[in-house]
Image (cartoon, rainbow, N blue to C red):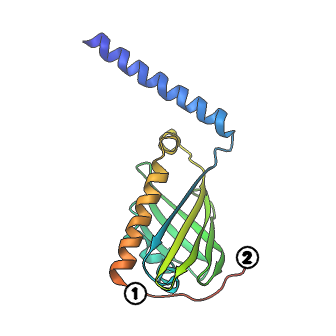
Amino acid sequence: MLGRRIATAAAIAVGGYLLSKQLTRSRGSDMTSTVEESIEVDVPISTAYNQWTQFEDLPQFMDSVHEVRQLDDKRLHWKASIAGKEKEWDAEITEQIPEERIAWRSLGGVHNAGVVTFHKISENKTRVMLQMDYDPESIDEKVGDALGFVKMQTKANLKRYKQLVESRGVETGAWRGTIPRQ
């Protein structure tokens, strides 16, 4: 029995090591990953966009995000759990065009950047598309990324966004300002 447990533990350790080596080989040294997901929501494009601009409400549908604090029109402070560890970072909105797109990049801390775009399908249906690039840092983050956890979490977050915005039918607020591309 003890021999079997030791063999199992050794196999798991070797598997983790080989997975780590494969990740390094397949992605190169920068280890940047990308997740792209979209969802259709049954609300007008203005409602979908306006709700997303309520950054401090993001934790209502992003389950690993604990807090987003808007520092000014372009900067946000984030607190979230990543691979079970609490992390904080600031992000900068690099482009914002009402009813079209919101792009951002982190300013230190957790390295990420991305864009959410809004596409009118009909008067009461909008496609929300999210693309995010991120750098998994710890081995836990790299393994989770390789197993598709970030993609699954993003998909679940968008489903919760859909439920939130459709159940209300109206946004909780709006910021209609424009931030030109930097």
Above-or-below relation of 181 to 64: below
Quadrant in which the C terminus appears: bottom right
- CA gap between label 2 and label 1 equals 28 Å
Corner quadrant of residue 73:
bottom right
Q: Residue 119: x, y in percent?
A: 58, 76
Residue shown at the point (44%, 60%) measured from the top left: 80
Farthest residue, direction right = 182
Which is nearer the eye, 171 or 76? 171
Q: Which quarter shows the N terminus?
A: top left
Above-or-below relation of 163 to 65: below
Q: Which mark is residue 170?
A: 1
**In the depicted structure, whether residue 172 falls above or below residue 181:** below
Q: Of the residues tagged 2 and 1, which is closer to the observer?
A: 1
Residue type at mark 2? Arg
| 119, 19: nearer the viewer | 119
* Label 1 element class: loop
Left or right: residue 163 compared with residue 109 = left
Q: Is residue 65 visible?
A: no
In the image, residue 127 above or below residue 43: above
Image spot of residue 129 (x, y percent): 55, 67
Q: In the image, what residue occupies the spot 61% across and 64% down?
A: 114
Q: Which residue is mark 2?
A: 181
Q: Which mark is residue 87?
A: none
Q: Residue at x 59, y 60 (%)?
A: 132
